[in-house]
Image (cartoon, helix red, strand yellow):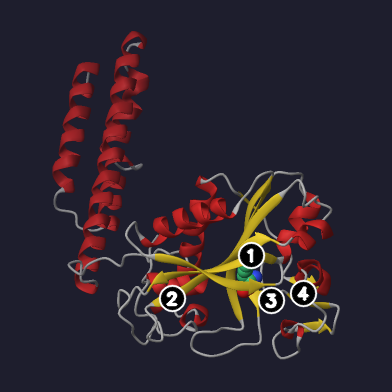
Amino acid sequence: MNSGEIVSRLRELGDAFKADLKSRESEMDIRALQAAYLGGKGEVTALRKMLGKIPAEERRTVGQALNDVKDRIEKAATSAIDILKEGASREYLERHVDLTLPGRVPTVGSLHPLSIVMYDIVDIFVSMGFDVVSGPEVETDYYNFGALNFPDDHPARDMQDTFFIKEGRTLLRTHTSPVQVRTMQSRSLPIKVVAPGVVYRRDDDPTHSPMFLQIEGLLVDEGVTFAHLKGVLSAFIHQIFGRDVKLRFRPSFFPFTEPSAEVDIECIACRGRGCRLCSQSGWIEILGSGMIDPAVLEESSIDPERYTGFAFGLGVDRIAMLRYEGITSIKLFYENDPRFLGCFRR
Ligand code: DAH
């Protein structure tokens, strides 16, 4: 055979391999066919052996043709095997898995409803220029009561109401108001902060949990008046409960404010007509507030002749129960049942 004949025979072998492949149905068959073409006894090898007998200047072309056919055969074998495997796995899936079933959507976590309400409240005060601060949950009697002008015999200091760690010394804070004192003693004036956090009281019924959330607010500057308190708190309530909700400032008493006021909103459930939720009064208490007592300012080395301020404290759980009507027990917030918690989105 001359070199032209060898080259064209090699091309024919490449085509013949492809045609033979069609009848092979397993990987083993395909590999056997490949060995028959390219192995020691195959025709390609026989043609390769003729390389030595052809003129040197034609060897390059024949060598190239030998490599090409080897390449074509190997590639065709591999791709035929790939196709077989893919078909087998599809057939397997179709036999064992129902591909028409809908997929499983992974569940995405959500914020706790109390966190949602807390962030919403904090955002409103931040938009009015308040900073966010925090304080410890294990407090001393001094910050929780003493520096806030609670007399020694105040009932809140009683074992019945407060979780004491060391009687008369350390306790679980009963409100976020101690953060007021810590802030006044560590920050320079003017001060404009809110302090969200967990507080503890020896209370346990459908509307009281031994652990609950409060947000404290504090503003101290020159020339602060009760009108500022009313303006800030009215703006806050209208943002959280809507423009048309009615509210009232009701005279009250706290040891650390003078004068003091509690703020009520018209009952969300009955629109003021009187129902079980509002104990037939038509009003629901939302927060406590007042002008900071001069004795409290003095205790934190702030001159009450020059500076005045207001403070307020609100219960996040109460606001959440009002916002998400139909929550009949505060306990739901703390049982951490994902079926309940998953109902809320910010
Ligand atoms: N600390 C009070 C409580 O837990 C709430 C409160 C009332 C906070 C009046 C204040 C305030 O800052 O001025 O019931």
Dot 3 falls on a residue whose secondary structure is: loop
Foreground disc of the pair 1, 4: 1
Residue 216 shows in the view:
no
User: Image quarter for residue 315?
Assistant: bottom right
User: Image quarter for residue 147?
Assistant: bottom right
Q: Looking at the figure, which quarter contains the N terminus?
A: top left
- Amino acid identity at mark 3: Thr
The answer to which of marks 3 and 4 sits earlier in the sequence is 4
Neighbour class for label 3 at 10 Å: few (<14), some, many (≥20)?
A: many
Compared to 172, does 191 lie above or below? above
Q: Which residue is mark 4?
A: 150
Compared to 55, does 101 lie above or below? below
Foreground disc of the pair 3, 1: 1
Residue 10 image point, x, y percent: 22, 29
Q: CA distance from mark 3 to mark 1?
A: 22 Å
Residue contact between numbered discs 3 and 4, judged by CB atoms under 8 Å: no
Q: Residue shown at 80%/77% (left/top)?
A: 151
Neighbour class for label 2 at 10 Å: few (<14), some, many (≥20)?
A: many
Q: Residue shown at 61%/83% (left/top)?
A: 210
